[in-house]
Amino acid sequence: MASLEDLSLEQRDELALLMKELSDNPETRKEALRLTRKVRPNLTIPELDIEDRTDSAISASEQRIMKLESQIREKEAREELNKRRTSLKEKGLAQSDEDIEQIEKLMLEQGMTNHETAAQYFEWMKQAATPTPNSAMGYNPSALSKFDLSKYWKNPQMGARDEAAKALTELRKNSRPIGI
């Protein structure tokens, strides 16, 4: 680094003028002061010291506020959750805490967001499916006995053609339209 003694008076004046312009310009003042502090760390610059202390105090305050807001949101969420759980018991959708645990597990597994819907779904899951009587489903085992499978065993294509021809003949001789 060259010393100032090696510079001419005009060069020193030019450097001094440049530094004055940088420190007087509001857009470059802080940067010039920070660069000066970088070169000479022990130099006291009150303008930067005050700003740095203020920024750190504001930052600490903002962090405290964010932490408090987070705690408040968490508390409100817990209260809302407890309110929903109590509501399930009051409405009779859950009988015990174990039911509520299972309902919430079901909510997580199925991606449900509503406690009442999940409780109703949980209740439906608990109910055993009652078997339907055969007559209600329209199943008639004797219908197969009327159907002759021997033709299909011999020649499946011919058996299918014969059955299709019978069905077509039956449809053609019916004078009523289909579906009525």
Image: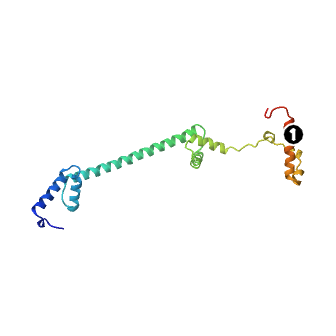
Measuring from the top left, give residue 139's x and y in whole percent.
81, 42
Measuring from the top left, give residue 9's x and y in whole percent.
9, 62
Q: Quadrant of residue 11?
A: bottom left
| In the image, residue 8 above or below residue 93 | below
Rate crowding at label 1 as few (under 14), some (14 to 19) or many (20 or more) other CA atoms within 10 Å.
Answer: few
Front residue of 9/20: it is: 9
Measuring from the top left, give residue 155's x and y in whole percent.
87, 53
Front residue of 22/72: it is: 22
Question: Which structural element holds mark 1?
Answer: helix
Measuring from the top left, give residue 89's x and y in whole percent.
57, 40
Please name the amino acid that badge 1 sits on.
Thr
Residue at 14% across / 55% down in the picture? Answer: 17
The answer to whether residue 155 is seen in the rendering is: yes
Residue at 85% across / 47% down in the picture? Answer: 161
Front residue of 111/128: it is: 111
What is the quadrant of the N terminus in the image? bottom left
Query: On the image, numbered disc 1 is attached to which residue?
Result: 169
Q: Is residue 142 left or right of residue 24?
A: right
